[in-house]
Image (cartoon, rainbow, N blue to C red):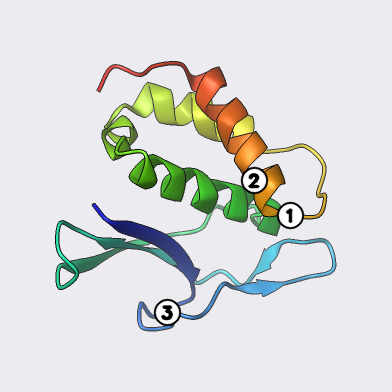
């Protein structure tokens, strides 16, 4: 896998849509989203649709998740996503907290802490 990103909206071709954010920092709308992946070769792009929970996602949580996914791909460890227990621990760490400014260093710190909290994984 050489790339990964998340977009929001009803249609997968809304590739530049990062969602609509409210003043509270939540992703507005209930149409779900898409996980876009580039597999093995630049011409093997794929996307997987997902539905939203009843509770709106905070923008900060969605951006933290996307950063973690990109980090796993960059480090060559996307196989950890096949371990549901590991994913549960990592995502639980990402959720919540304060809605601070999102910078590359702050995303890097929270991803490192989520990886440490989730442990080595078994996949």
Viewer-closest of 93 and 72: 72
In terms of secondary structure, where does tag 2 sit?
helix
Q: Earlier in the sequence, mark 3 or mark 2?
A: 3
Q: Report which quarter residue 87 is drawn in.
A: top left
In the image, residue 56 lies at what x, y percent?
65, 57
Residue 54 seen in render: no
Residue named by callout 1? 102
- Quadrant containing the C terminus in the rendered view: top left
Q: Is 19 rendered above or below residue 51?
A: below
Q: Position of residue 76 (x, y in %)?
A: 29, 39
Tell me: residue 71, above or below residue 33. Answer: above
**Residue 60 appears in view:** yes
Earlier along the polypeptide chain: callout 1 or callout 3?
A: 3
Q: Nearer the viewer, residue 39 or 17?
A: 39
Nearer to us in this view, 3 or 16: 3
The dot on residue 107 is 2
- How packed mark 1 is, by other alpha carbons closer than 10 Å (few <14, some 14-19, many 20 or more), is few
29 on left or right of 120? right
Residue 7 percent location from the top left of the image? 47, 69
Q: CA distance from mark 1 to mark 2?
A: 7 Å
Identify the image quadrant of residue 122.
top left
Residue 102 lies left or right of residue 57; in this view the side is right
Residue linked to disc 3:
15
- Whether pointer 1 and pointer 2 mark residues with C-beta atoms closer than 8 Å, the reply is yes
Query: Residue at 42% of width from left, 79% of height from top?
Result: 15
Assess disc 2: are there few (<14), some (14-19) or many (≥20) residues with their C-alpha within 10 Å of its C-alpha. Answer: some
Work out whether mark 1 precedes mark 2 in sequence or the reverse, and give the earlier one.
1
Secondary structure under badge 3? loop
């Amino acid at each position: 896998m050489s790339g990964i990103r998340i977009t929001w909206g009803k249609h997968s071709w809304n590739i530049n849509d990062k969602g609509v954010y409210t003043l509270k920092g939540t992703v507005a709308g209930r149409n779900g989203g898409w996980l876009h992946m580039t597999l093995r070769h630049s011409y093997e792009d794929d996307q997987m649709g997902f539905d939203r929970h009843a509770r709106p996602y905070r923008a900060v949580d969605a951006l933290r998740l996307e950063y973690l996914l990109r980090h796993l791909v960059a480090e060559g460890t996307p196989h950890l996503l096949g371990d549901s227990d590991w994913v549960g621990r990592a995502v639980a760490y990402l959720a919540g907290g304060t809605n601070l400014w999102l910078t590359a260093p702050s995303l890097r710190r929270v991803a490192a802490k989520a990886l440490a909290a989730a442990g080595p994984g078994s996949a």
